[in-house]
Image (cartoon, helix red, strand yellow):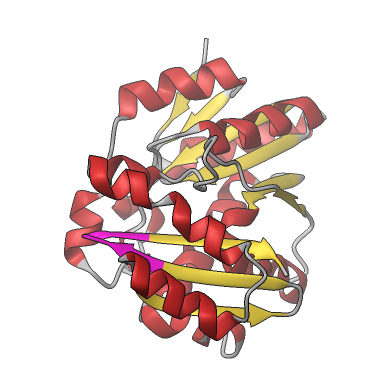
Amino acid sequence: MIELLHATSPAQARFRQLSRDGHSIGFVPTMGALHPGHLGLIERARAENDRAVVSIYVNPTQYDDPDDLANYPRPLEEDLQKAESAGADIVFLPKYDDIYADAYRYRVTERRFSRVLEGAHRAGHFDGVLTVVLKLFGIVRPERAYFGEKDWQQLQLVRDMARAFFLDLEIVSCPVVREADGLAMSSRNVRLTAEERKLAPEFHRVLSSGMPVDEMESALEATGFGVDYVERHGDRILGAVHLGSVRLIDNVEA
């Protein structure tokens, strides 16, 4: 039977007790609307640790668009069933006042890599992401935390934050999970119309095509995508596009 924790103080006490009893914790922070990509993270956390902990919290501080926040799917009962089937032992379900008792007066700000790619198009996004992740790490105290490579920039920033603050945990990266047609799995995909869903796999196909980056952007626009960016960073090509009201991100090895 999966264990549900809500308020911060009892959750902290529970996780401290697990540590005192010698149980390792693998942690998967999510915003819910779980899909097979999330479930793969949970399965790996369970395989590599004594306890797998999942958080479900739709974090408002990482949104600059109120409509995007309001439209984020929240199928809690379905999420709990999926988390349990994937091997989660504990699900942490905090509220805003639990996480932001300080009313977001204190926050984590990274001043370089967070300003490009997603950060250049979503004001304050990574302040919100890094702040909530640091708070969750402080509550759960995991040995390992699991993040998908679809959100590649986020993964790098979380890993760098853990190093910068000397956090005693391992950030484990897990490969992108894709649909059979190549579309990266995302909680946003359910908001695509039938026609948009047919077009969406072209995003990954173009990123993987090997054509010059500037030609990728032109090819996506010609196909019907609105393009925020297509850029190369090191050994990755990263992109963000719009189909109707849905924003998609993806990345591939260059």
Spot occupied by residue 76 in the image (x, y as percentages of width and height) = 32, 29
43 vs 139: above or below: above
Residue 4 is drawn in which quadrant?
Answer: top left
Spot occupied by residue 225 in the image (x, y as percentages of width and height) = 33, 67
Spot occupied by residue 41 in the image (x, y as percentages of width and height) = 64, 37
- Of residues 212 and 186, the one nearer the viewer is 212
Residue 119 horizontal side relative to residue 169, left or right:
left
Q: Which residues are magenta?
A: 241-247
Q: Residue at x 17, y 61 (%)?
A: 67
118 vs 20: above or below: below
Spot occupied by residue 214 in the image (x, y as percentages of width and height) = 53, 85
Magenta residues, dominant SS class: strand
- Of residues 208 and 234, the one nearer the viewer is 208
- Of residues 153 and 24, the one nearer the viewer is 153
Q: Is residue 25 visible?
A: yes
Residue 142 is drawn in which quadrant?
Answer: top right
Residue furthest toward the top?
1
- Residue 244 magenta-drawn? yes
